[in-house]
Amino acid sequence: MRIPESIEKAIETGNEAELKDICRGLHPADAAAAFTSLDEDQQELFAKFLDNEALSLITSFLPAPESADLVAGLEEQDRSVILESLPDDVVADLIQETDLDHQQEYEELLSGEKKDAVETLLSYPEDSAGGRMTTAFAKVREGMTVKETIETLEETKEDAEILARIYVTDDHNRILGKVRLRDLTFNKWSTPINEIMDNEQISISAEADQEEALKLMVKYDMLALPVVDSDSRLLGIITFDDALEIQEEESTEDLEKAAAIAGERDEEGYLKSPVLSHFKRRAVWVFLLAIVAILSGLVILNYEQLLENVFILAVYMPMIVATGGNTGAQSATMVIRAMSLGEFSPSEFFRVVWKELKIGLALGALLGVLIAVGSWLLINAFLSEESLKTITGNYSLNKLVMTVGIALTIQVAASTFIGAALPMMAKAFKLDPAVVASPAITTIVDVLGLLIYFGIASAILGI
């Protein structure tokens, strides 16, 4: 029997002991996943059957909206116990998901120290380094010995979220370096901390964007990243598990923007998010892109006479347009990714677009020659002279395939140029490059491709 089914059966039969046994044998993350798969009534019974210790473990692995719903359904006494036992950053996320009345109520249930820590986190934007840090970390003073450090850690070991990194600070709470548990283990008790600590002082401002914190942690392969205020005083740390969450959020955000999906993502997940929420996030961009796409129709309408005279030109329209959209999207994806990894900045605009233009010209020339030669061979092989005249309108087949080849070459080159230029221009103007990615670029190069195609056809064929 699958775990969710066994949990459902225990809830339906009212078997509290069985539910407790099942959850006791599960990792809290698996129990949290099972909880999210239940309906609202089942979740209410689930919370009612379990004790506060089990609920605290499970709640810390739930998405913030669902943890807020779980806590809201508890009695005040149980609610206080759960909130006090959760990590301060989890409590802050939970409180942010509740209305203003409940926010104040929840804060009043916290102890003074916990309340101060949570209020500090809530004072920073949710997507900033300060909003993602935890204040539950280990630190010691520079003048301590190994023995004094271990004694200090003994007092704070239950509160610290991570003990693999212990930060050494001066009297003004500024970072001087860090020590590791193994440094303490393999040194004499009388050894001064400043003799065995490293001098790494890499940190990030609490006001910085969470993505910048992620980049630092990846660049320096950090288990935890210190977060400091404007005076370089240590406020908290961002741990590796928080970094993984940030990476997931940023990747999802970029993916959605590239697909023209706007607005904030619902943390409940796809299935539990209301249809209206999905509709609102997609509708505006879809409408705007549809309006822009009308331009393609107007271009075709303007060259109606050309298509009537040379019907075979219509056969290559979808290929010209689609190839431009594909190569433009490829170029944009490569440039956006490279910028996000810090491989270059908008100041290197001309170097990047020149490189993409050369790539586009090479791709376009290859495709142009292959399509032109292939079309010439196939048409001559499979069409009679009479059929050929019908679809070409008595125009030279050589000129027709040359039109297609040249148009395809220019379209691919122009598309790769635009795919590289637009994201970099967006970045230069402090906009998100992902916003101008795939759908927007595809729509632009569709219109451009038709203009290039019909313009070259008119010039070569003299129509």
Image: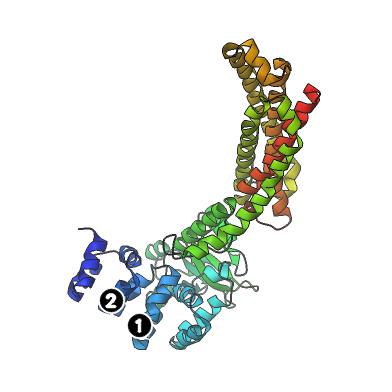
Q: Disc 1 on helix, strand or loop?
A: loop
Out of 448 and 437, give the one closest to the viewer.
448
**297 w.r.t. 11: above or below:** above
Q: Which residue is mark 2?
A: 45
Q: Coloring scheme of the render? A: rainbow
Residue visible at 69% across and 41% down? 297
Residue visible at 64% across and 12% down? 386
Q: Find residue 203 and report its horizontal and vertical position in percent.
A: 58, 64
Q: Which residue is mark 1?
A: 74
Category of crowding for the residue at label 1, using alpha-carbon neighbours closer than 10 angstroms: few (below 14), some (14–19), many (at least 20): some
State the quadrant of the C terminus. top right
Q: Examine the image and state in which quarter residue 34 appears.
A: bottom left
Q: Disc 2 on helix, strand or loop?
A: helix
- Label disc, if present, on residue 111 of the rendered structure: none
Q: Is residue 301 left or right of residue 382?
A: right
Q: Find residue 368 and report its horizontal and vertical position in percent.
A: 66, 24
Query: Comparing marks 2 and 1, which lies closer to the viewer?
Result: 2
Out of 415 and 199, give the one closest to the viewer.
415
Q: Amino acid at mark 1?
A: Leu
**325 w.r.t. 280: above or below:** above
Q: Earlier in the sequence, mark 2 or mark 1?
A: 2
Q: Is residue 291 left or right of residue 101?
A: right
Residue visible at 68% across and 36% down? 356
Q: Is residue 385 visible?
A: yes
